Image (cartoon, helix red, strand yellow):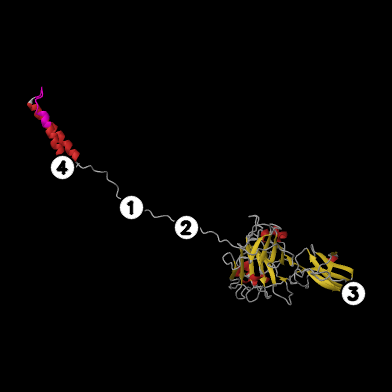
Amino acid sequence: MNKRDGRSFFVLLILVVLTVFSCNLPGMSAGTEADDLRETVQVLSSAVAERNSPIESPTAPAVSDEATQPAPEVTHTPEPQPTLITHNLVPAQPGWVARWFTDTDSSRTAVENRAPGGDAFSKNIFERPFTPSDMQFRPDLDIQKAEVSSDTNFIYVTIYLKGLNPQTSALTGLYGVELDTDYDGRGNYLILVTDPAGTDWRMENVNAYADSGRKVGGSRPMNADAPTGYTGYDLTIFSLTNLSDPDAAWGRVSPKGSSIVDVAFKRALIGGKTSFLWSVWADDGIKDPAQFDYNDHFTQADAGSPYKDANYPLKSLALVDSTCREIFNFTPTGDIPGMCVPPATATPIPPTAPPPPSEPGRITGLVFADNNNNGQRDAGDNPACPGVSIWYHEGACGSVGLLARISMGGGCSFSVGNLPAGTYCVSASGYELTTPREVTVNVPAGGAANVIFGIYVIP
């Protein structure tokens, strides 16, 4: 109500009261009427004053300018979706095995926390599928055998391991192949599969590397030159983030077994080369392509030893197994650093035609302990043949022939006679050798061909 309305209301009430009290009511005196009139006027005045007083609203909290602003809209950035990789060509199954070789089986001496042989630190060939210090055996790093094959599109390398990692029940580490495409003992390409799982071909966990400037191996390829600081494989030529050709390299667990790894790659990945030297690796230790060759970055003392010698046990260089280099699709003309000598296997060819009848000849030989492991019999290298078996077949080593066993005589000598003159392959099995495992000999008519095999002696 405004002030004008308040005054009008007050006047109206006064008139009503005066009118009422102006009458002579029975039983009421003049004094009483006056007193009542005054009280009534006071009451009415208070009522009017109260009616006219402004009504105060409750104090509202202060509102800041910031609170009065509209809330910003929340925008949700969609998570990036993985890029769909389109493949035009996927590897098939590895086919006919062109070449293969076996490697040292360290499980035979695992309970002794050592390798039985096969480790040649000075030649960058390692047999170290053991943890550092406590020398616990890792079957998923112990290479048993390697094979190479090819088809129109891919080259395939198959790596056989002793078993799975007992801690993970899987293959844990890097597995792959190193290639020497110009036959000088210096690696040119390295293709690795990380933690392979599943029998389908995958490329997401495959990486391939190249050496941009002939640095791998240092000044003397395959020989120990430590300590040096060069960077070995310095170019990543294939990875999930470098897919100029997403079909170039693949890896998987082989359908043939849970501890077998298949690697496949195109020839274009290695510069279109159709022949090369190849070796295989299993590595859960250093795992650094930039430090190839490993024996150029660690001294023998720093690396440790898998043998119970002065450098035992393994130290900085552990959890790694590698092999010598086998040939593929070419015939070597000289001694190449790191090459398996003689080549571990050969492409099977039909048996040679039998020679014409002639006076029979014989094969004789001896197995000895190579005390200084130099591959030849020296003074003091006495006969020794624990667990060694001797075999032979007609034809040169690498050809297909019917194997026959030669009985071992006293003093670790062996002999077989009444053989037609011609070419034979004599081989030894059952122990680590310092000499070639198989030797081609020519048996002369009426004469003998002599062969010796040296076995590895742990210092």
Residue 19 magenta-highlighted? yes
What residue occupies the far top of the structure in this picture?
A: 27
Q: What's the mark number on residue 77? A: 2
Which amino acid type is shown beneath numbered disc 3? Ala
The CA distance from mark 2 to mark 1 is 27 Å
Q: Does 94 sit above or below residue 11?
A: below
Q: Secondary structure at mark 1?
A: helix
User: Within the image, what quadrant is residue 383 found in?
Assistant: bottom right
Q: Earlier in the sequence, mark 2 or mark 1?
A: 1
Considering depth in this image, is 158 or 274 the residue closer to the camera? 274
Q: Residue at 63% across / 76% down in the picture?
A: 219
Label 4 close to label 2 by CB (< 8 Å): no
Which amino acid type is shown beneath numbered disc 4? Arg
Closer to the eye: label 3 or 2: 2
The C terminus lies in quadrant: bottom right
Q: Secondary structure at mark 2?
A: loop
**Residue 300 in view, yes or no:** no
- Badge 2: how crowded within 10 Å, few (<14), some, or many (20+)? few
The CA distance from mark 3 to mark 2 is 87 Å
Label 3 close to label 2 by CB (< 8 Å): no
**Residue 273 placement (x, y as % from top left):** 67, 73
Q: Does 364 sit above or below residue 59?
A: below
Residue denoted by label 1: 68
**Residue 121 placement (x, y as % from top left):** 67, 69
Residue denoted by label 4: 4
Q: Which residues are magenta?
A: 17-28
